[in-house]
Amino acid sequence: MLSAMVGFLALGASFLVPARHFAARRQRGWALGSRLVPLGVLAGFAASSATVPAFTPGAALGLLWLTAITARLATTLPATHN
């Protein structure tokens, strides 16, 4: 369980990279979301000290945001062909 929590904390920290991408392109909502979602993941991590199931909403939020970012970038970035 500890390794999963560390992994989700790393996931939350990694959202700061797309936050810069979105901010540079003046997509403020996506940039703000990429900065706030890690707080939700961190809150779930902190709540897990009381009960392990309390971590689930924070982890789910992180995975949902990862899916949203992936879908957004897949539709907006130009495709490269070899």
Image (cartoon, rainbow, N blue to C red):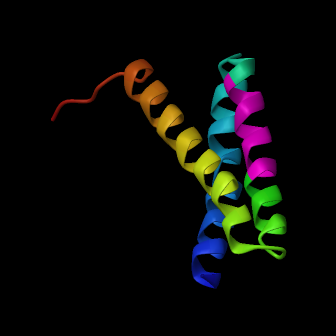
Quarter in which the N terminus is drawn: bottom right
Relative vertical location of residue 41 with respect to residue 33 in this rendering, above or below? below
| Image-quadrant location for residue 52 | bottom right
Instruction: Name the residue located 59 percent from the left edge and 70 percent from the top edge.
Output: 7
How many labels were placed on the picture?
0
Instruction: Give residue 15's position: percent from left, percent from top.
Output: 66, 47
Q: Which stretch appears magenta?
A: 30-40
Q: Is residue 3 above or below residue 16?
A: below
Q: Can you name the residue that lies furthest to the bottom here?
A: 2
Front residue (pair 44, 16): 44
Question: Does the magenta-highlighted stretch encompass residue 63?
Answer: no
State which quarter of the image contains the C terminus: top left
Residue at 75% x, 19% y: name it.
Answer: 28
Q: Residue at 43% across / 29% down in the picture? A: 71
Q: In which quarter of the image is residue 17?
A: top right
The relative height of residue 37 versus residue 11 in the rendered view (above or below) is: above
* Residue 32 in the figure: left or right of residue 67: right
Residue 38 in magenta stretch: yes
- Residue 20 point in image, percent of width and height: 70, 36
